[in-house]
Image (spheres, coloured by chain):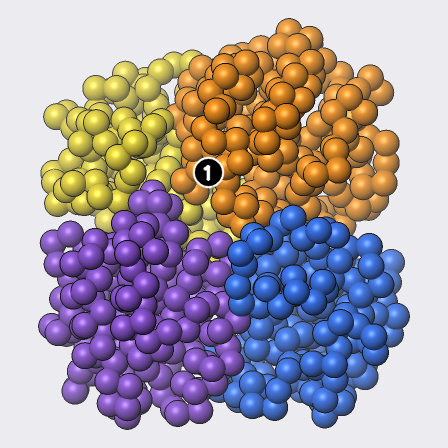
Chain colours: A orange, B yellow, C blue, D purple
Amino acid sequence: MIPSKTALILIEYQNDFTTLGGVMHEAVKTCMEQTNMLENTSNALINARQKGVKIIYAPITFSEDYREINSNIYGALKNVLQAKAFRKNSWGGEITDHLKPEANDIIVEGKRGLDAFYSTNLDFILRQLDIRHVAICGFLTNCCVESTVRTAYEKGYDVYTLNDCCATTGYEEQHIALTKDLPLFSHVVNHQKWLNSLD
Amino acid sequence: MIPSKTALILIEYQNDFTTLGGVMHEAVKTCMEQTNMLENTSNALINARQKGVKIIYAPITFSEDYREINSNIYGALKNVLQAKAFRKNSWGGEITDHLKPEANDIIVEGKRGLDAFYSTNLDFILRQLDIRHVAICGFLTNCCVESTVRTAYEKGYDVYTLNDCCATTGYEEQHIALTKDLPLFSHVVNHQKWLNSLD
Amino acid sequence: MIPSKTALILIEYQNDFTTLGGVMHEAVKTCMEQTNMLENTSNALINARQKGVKIIYAPITFSEDYREINSNIYGALKNVLQAKAFRKNSWGGEITDHLKPEANDIIVEGKRGLDAFYSTNLDFILRQLDIRHVAICGFLTNCCVESTVRTAYEKGYDVYTLNDCCATTGYEEQHIALTKDLPLFSHVVNHQKWLNSLD
Amino acid sequence: MIPSKTALILIEYQNDFTTLGGVMHEAVKTCMEQTNMLENTSNALINARQKGVKIIYAPITFSEDYREINSNIYGALKNVLQAKAFRKNSWGGEITDHLKPEANDIIVEGKRGLDAFYSTNLDFILRQLDIRHVAICGFLTNCCVESTVRTAYEKGYDVYTLNDCCATTGYEEQHIALTKDLPLFSHVVNHQKWLNSLD
C-alpha cells in the first residue's frame, strides 16, 4: 500500500466513549481494556502519520436538543438520545486528549447516523485525495465501525479493519464481528500488521 | 402500520441459496431448516400481499464472466465469484419456484453488491411509492440482509427484520446478528407479529 | 403543503457571494440586483419561520489550505480554490448578517461539493424530520441550487425552486435555468406564491 | 488518459429518442441533425472500443404500467409517463440498431430517474473496474446527461462531456448547457479531441 493513497479513519474517539465520566464509557470499558485499543490506536496513529498516511477523524455530534433526530427514534440512535451523548459543545463530544488531531489531519463533518459515509463528507474527501486503501478503527466494533466498513467495501475501497483498535459493549459481539462479519467486507488485521504493509 | 406505506423486501431467494443443487445451498441448509424460513417467508408473503403491502424482490445477479467485479476482489463477493453463483441466465440465479413474484410485485434491478440499496433502484422506488415501513428478510442474515437493514435505518425508514425469515452460514452468526446487531438498526420480530401489526 | 413537513433550504448566503467585498460578489451583483433576491429571501424566511416551516442553511466551507480538494481540480471548485472563497474562519465564509440563522434553525454540515446533498447531512436530517416538501434558493442558480434541486427530485422530494430568490453570474444562465432546466425537476415559483401554498 | 481506466457512458440511445417513430424523437430531431450526434457517437464508440476504453450503456426503462413512478409525478418523469416512453419490452425502449452493444460492453441496470448514478449500479461498476475518467454523451443534454455529469464530478471522477454527441429539445438549452453549465462540472470537448487524448 502506498501511504499517500491510504487513510486511517478513526471513528468516534470522543470522551463519551473513551474516558472515565463519559456517558457511554462504562458500557465499553471492559472491551477497551481487553483489546488495549486506545494505546494500539495511538501507536497506529503516530506511525501512520509519520509514513504519510492521511489521518481522518470521524466524530459524531448532535445539537444540544438533538433536533436532527426524530423524537420517535429507535435502535442505536435512541441510546444516544437517552444518554444525551455526543453533544457538540460538551466535554463528552470532544475527541479524547490522548489522540488529538494534528494540524494536517482532516476532521470529517456532518456525522449524525452510524455509517461514517452516509451523513458526512467522508467519501467526497477520500475521492478528492485519491485515497484507495482505508483502515478503520474505533467504536463500536459492530455498530459504527462495521457500518462504515460495509459501505467502504460497497464503494470499492480496499478496506482494512484494525482488530486491536476497536471496542464494543460485549465479548460475543466483538468476537463475532471480528471473526465472522467484518471479514466479509474487509481484511481484518492488527495494527502492527497493517503498519508493516505500508511501503 | 398502513399496508400501502409498507414494503416487504425479499433478499436473494434464488436457487443458488434456496434449493438443493444451488452452489451455496449447502452452506445455509442447516440454518434454513432450523428457522423454517422458506415456509415462514411464504406465509408472510401471501398474507402481506393480500393486505396490500408492496412486495419487492431484490435478487443479486452477475454476467456470465463476472465482468462487473474486480478480479482481485476479496470478502463476500470473492465467495460469489469463486462459486460462480447468481449468474443472470442460470438456474441458480432464478428466484425459487416456491416464492415466485406475481404480476403486481416489483423486482429491484442492478444488485451487484451486498447492500440492496447501494447498486439498485430500491430507494428510488420506495420514495416514489411513498413507502415508510420496510420489513426485510432473506439471505444472509449477517451479510446482505444486515447491510440492507443498516442502510434502511440510516435513510430514515421504519425498519423491521423478520427473524424467522432469515438464514446464514452458522448458528453463532445468526444468533448474534438477530439478538445483538440487528436490534441496533431495526425492530426484530417474527413474521406473524409483523403481520399482526399491519392495519 | 403542511408547514411541519416543509423545509426552506438556503444555499450559500455567505459574504463571499452576498456582500460588497466578498471575493465572488462582483460576479453575482448584477443578477442579485435584478432579482432583488436578498430582500425576497428575507421575506420568505421570516414568513416561513412564522408558519412553522423548518429553516435549513447549507453553507459551503473549506479549510484554510483547501486540503479537502484535489490540487488538480477543474470546473466550479477550481474557481472557488483560485478565489480563496468560503474559508471556514474567514468573514467571507460567514452567513450574511441580513439572514442570520435563529436558535431553532438547522445548519447543514459538511458541504464541500456543489450538490447540497452529496457531502452533507442534509438528507439524513430531512428524513429524520419527515420533511416531504423542500423549497430551494440561493447561489448559484445554475450551479449549487440546480444540483441540489436535481438530487432532491431524484430522491423523491416535492421540490420548489424560488425563482426570485436565486442569482448567478449572467442573464442567459439565469433565464435558461429558471425557464428550461429547473422546471424539469421542480415547481418553479416566486416566493410569495410558495408562501401562499403553505397551509 | 489510460484507456483501461476510462469509460464511455452512453445515455439513453433508445428508439424513443433516436429513431423516427419513437415517441420522443420529434422533440429532439432538429438538435440531432444539427449536431450529427448519432454519427459522431458511432465514431466515438468504434474508436474507443478499439483502444480498450470500457463501453457502458445507460438506458432508462419502465414497466408497462409505470408502477415505479408516483402517479402524481411532475417534471421530466411526468413527460416520460404521459408519452408512455421507454417501456421495457417495447421497441421504443430498445437501444437503437445503429449503436448496439457488443459482447464485452456493460449495460447499466436500474435507471428510472434522470441521473444515471442514482438508481443504478453505475458507480458500483466504475469503482470495481477502477475507472477514473468518464466521457458522457446522449440524451438530453440538459437533463439526464447533465445530471449524470454533475454527479460524476461530485464523486471525484475526471469528467468529459462530448459536445457533438448530445442532443436536447431546443437550441437555447443546448447552447447554454454546453457553454455555461457543463463546463462547471466537466471538460466539454468534441469526440475527436477526446479520442486524441487517449493514450
Chain name for mark 1? A
- The residue sitting at 59% across, 64% down in the picture is C78
Give the residue pinned by disc 1: A132
**Callout 1 environment at 10 Å: few (<14), some (14 to 19), or many (20+)?**
some
Compared with residue B148, is residue A182 higher up or lower down, i.e. above or below? above
**In the picture, residue D129 is in which quadrant?**
top left
- Residue B132 coordinates in the image, percent (x, y): 52, 53
User: From this viewpoint, is residue B82 visible?
Assistant: yes
Report the side of D40 relative to A170 (left or right). left
**Secondary structure of the residue carrying numbered label 1:** loop
At label 1, the amino acid type is Arg
Compared with residue C194, is residue B144 higher up or lower down, i.e. above or below? above
Report the side of C102 relative to D114 (left or right). right
User: From this viewpoint, is residue D113 visible?
Assistant: no
- The residue sitting at 75% across, 16% down in the picture is A26
Report the side of C141 relative to B147 (left or right). right
- Residue B196 coordinates in the image, percent (x, y): 47, 40
Report the side of D15 relative to B2 (left or right). left
- The residue sitting at 69% across, 13% down in the picture is A39
- Residue C47 coordinates in the image, percent (x, y): 81, 77
Which of B116 and A10 lies nearest the eye of the viewer? A10
- Residue C11 coordinates in the image, percent (x, y): 69, 68
Compared with residue A131, is residue C9 higher up or lower down, i.e. above or below? below
- The residue sitting at 72% across, 63% down in the picture is C84
Which of B59 and B46 lies nearest the eye of the viewer? B59
**In the picture, residue A74 is in which quadrant?**
top right
Which of A112 and B188 lies nearest the eye of the viewer? A112
How many labels sit on residues? 1
